[in-house]
Image (cartoon, grey):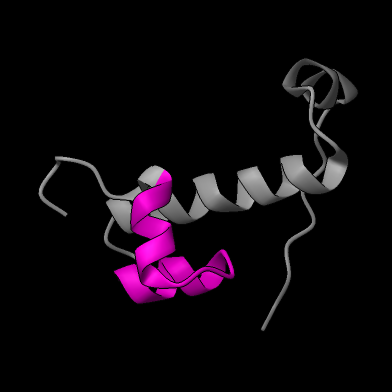
Amino acid sequence: MPTLSLPYPDDLLITSGKSPQALEKELTFLLAVKLFELRRFSLGKAAAFCDMGCAVYVRAGAVGDSGY
């Protein structure tokens, strides 16, 4: 699978209060959520992208009341 390297400013890391690994995991999750909303990812692919099972992905708040 191709990879993406995404630079982010130090202040994002500081204001998040998270470790670099935790912030990168959160950013990966947010990207998966957006791609799911745009219907570019299925629920299963979005969950797998985040290294989560579908149920965990849904419980994490990825699927709201928007009908998806």
Relative to the observer, which residue lies in front, 17 or 24? 17
Q: Splitting the image into 4 quarters, where does residue 12 fall?
A: top right
Question: Would residue 41 be seen by someone viewing this image from the given angle?
Answer: no
Point 67% across, 84% down: residue: 1
In the image shown, does 18 or 35 lie closer to the viewer?
Answer: 18
Q: Residue at x 23, y 42 (%)?
A: 64
Residue 42 locus on image (x, y percent): 31, 71
Q: Measuring from the top left, give residue 46's x and y in whole percent.
A: 43, 66
Residue drawn 82% across the image and 27% down it? 13
Q: Position of residue 34 (x, y in %)?
A: 40, 47
Residue 11 location, x and y as percent?
84, 17
Q: Is residue 38 above or below residue 10?
A: below
Q: Which residues are magenta?
A: 41-60
In this view, the residue farthest toward the right is: 10
Q: Residue at x 68, y 51 (%)?
A: 25
Q: Nearer the viewer, residue 18 or 4?
A: 18
* Residue 1 located left or right of residue 41: right
Occupied quadrant, residue 66: top left
On the rendered structure, is 66 left or right of 63? Answer: left
**26 relative to 15 in the view: left or right:** left
Quadrant where the C terminus is found in the figure? bottom left
